[in-house]
């Protein structure tokens, strides 16, 4: 199968993409977080193709994407007031709410669960596509299972060429990390299952009288996560990754020692770090083995380039990756969650 990359401009482009969705085919599309791999969310056979194209385990449910909030009431059997409040505050935006599912949603979408993930993306191409298709679009991130999520059409093409007919190109994703997943099925409390750009702090400000919990698995390593997908190896670059976290000077020193040690051992490490750290270490790391993640402490800049950084060295003669982590508050919590998974937990606090 040939895979076309199309920058949609005219209504006819959306009609064509929507026609593919309605006919049961897969179409990748941009969102403000990462690219999604879309199928008609009411068509079990089409959704099965998503699992095949990604190599994804079938117990890992898909998120249904909607164009406006009224569609939420068609796919959930109930939208509790707290969930409705969250949606009006943060949608369209990087938020997925877990709600009890409506009876007509296929089991393949929800991995057999009684709940369904619902998200209204803040991206005009995504919403035009959903509206033109006239159905909720089931879409996981458009990467091969286990790989870093794609944030450009070219990254989707790397993983999906020959597997899907069409990629809608909307340029680089604005945020770069997947949506915040919030379980809204418990009365009077919310649980964050995956951190994202809608932060716990933002939710607590919006709903001051509601208990906002973090899924235990986000803090305790031995807990089984409640978002099935969070248990799998994820976001992994080809070379093994180690993450360093601490104050600026301490991280620079630790990274300097480790780079020198690895080079002395005949290895060729690459460095993913803040501009400040890479300036400090420029004498010992060749420029082509560095990835600049923006000014230290600029979490938005880091999130936006994180998956590009994790893919950048895949085809270069690099034997290992060293990265500078961030503080784990606000958007930093989402960044550190992804780095923890990408490194298999190899995080060193200095
Ligand atoms: O930003 C995003 O959410 C992107 C874009 C494309 O919208 N999508 C995305 O999908 O990240 P995916 O499939 O890569 O991650 C969805 C996560 C998985 O960890 C899955 O287990 C969890 O959401 N999930 C989906 N439905 C669920 C449910 N009913 N209950 C608990 N977790 C659920
Ligand atoms: Mg994913």
Image (cartoon, rainbow, N blue to C red):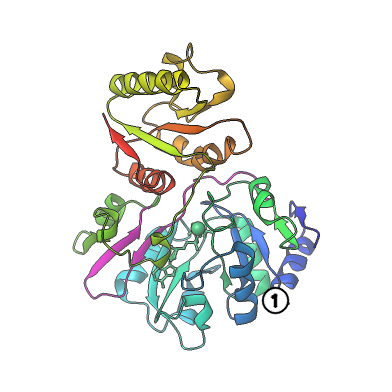
Q: Is residue 43 visible?
A: no
Quarter assignment of residue 345: top left
Using the rendered view, name the quadrant where residue 243 is placed: top left
Q: Residue at x 27, y 54 (%)?
A: 221
- In the rendered image, residue 87 lying in the magenta stretch gets the answer no
Q: Can you say which quadrant of the picture contains the N terminus?
A: bottom right
Circle 1 is placed at which residue position?
A: 24
Q: Which residues are magenta?
A: 169-195
Considering every residue shown, the one lying at the far top of the view is 283
Q: Residue furthest bottom?
A: 103
Estimate the x, y position of residue 94 in percent, counting from the top left: 45, 55
Front-lying residue, 192 or 224:
224
Q: Is residue 345 above or below residue 275?
A: below
Looking at the image, is 107 positioned above or below residue 218? below
Residue 296 on image: x %, y %: 38, 27
Q: Going by the image, does 78 lie left or right of 111?
A: left
Q: On the rendered structure, is 184 left or right of 313?
A: left
What x and y, as percent, mark residue 322?
A: 43, 31
Name the chief secondary structure element in magenta: loop
Dot 1: within a 10 Å radius of its alpha carbon, few (fewer than 14), some, or many (20 or more) residues?
A: many
Q: Residue at x 49, y 40 (%)?
A: 306
Q: Position of residue 74 (x, y in %)?
A: 49, 81
| Residue 212 visible at all | yes
Vertical order, 58 against 347 (above or below): below
Rendered residue at 21%/64% (across/down): 210
User: Which quadrant is the C terminus positioned in?
Assistant: top left
In the foreground, 261 or 205: 261
Label 1 secondary element: loop
């Amino acid at each position: 199968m040939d895979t076309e990359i199309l920058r949609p401009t005219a209504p006819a482009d959306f009609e064509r993409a929507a026609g593919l969705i309605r006919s049961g085919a897969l179409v990748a599309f941009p969102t403000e977080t990462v690219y999604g791999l879309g199928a008609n969310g009411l068509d079990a056979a089409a959704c099965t193709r998503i699992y095949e194209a990604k190599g994804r385990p079938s117990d890992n449910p898909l998120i249904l994407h909607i164009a406006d909030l009224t569609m939420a009431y068609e796919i959930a059997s109930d939208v509790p007031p707290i969930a409705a409040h969250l949606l009006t505050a943060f949608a369209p935006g990087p938020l997925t709410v877990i709600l009890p599912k409506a009876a007509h949603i296929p089991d393949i979408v929800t991995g057999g669960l009684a709940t369904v993930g619902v998200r209204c993306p803040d991206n005009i191409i995504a919403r035009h596509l959903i509206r033109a298709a006239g159905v909720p679009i089931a879409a996981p991130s458009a990467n091969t299972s286990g790989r870093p999520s794609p944030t450009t059409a070219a990254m989707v093409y790397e993983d999906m060429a020959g597997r899907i007919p069409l990629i809608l190109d909307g340029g680089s994703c604005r945020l770069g990390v997947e949506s915040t997943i919030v379980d809204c099925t418990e009365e009077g409390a919310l649980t964050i299952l995956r951190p994202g750009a809608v932060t716990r702090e933002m939710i607590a400000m919006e709903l001051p009288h509601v208990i906002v919990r973090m899924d235990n698995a986000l803090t305790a390593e031995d807990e089984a996560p409640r978002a099935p997908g969070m248990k799998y190896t994820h976001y992994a670059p080809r070379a093994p990754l180690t993450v360093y976290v601490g104050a600026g000077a301490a991280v620079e020193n630790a990274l300097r020692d480790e780079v020198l040690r690895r080079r002395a051992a005949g290895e060729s490490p690459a460095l993913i770090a803040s501009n400040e750290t890479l300036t400090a270490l420029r004498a010992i790391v060749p420029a082509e083995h560095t990835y600049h993640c923006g000014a230290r402490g600029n979490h938005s800049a880091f999130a936006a380039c994180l998956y590009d950084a994790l893919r950048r060295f895949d085809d270069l003669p690099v034997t290992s990756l060293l990265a500078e982590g961030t503080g784990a508050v606000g958007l930093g919590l989402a960044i550190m969650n992804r780095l923890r998974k990408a490194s298999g937990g190899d995080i060193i606090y200095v």
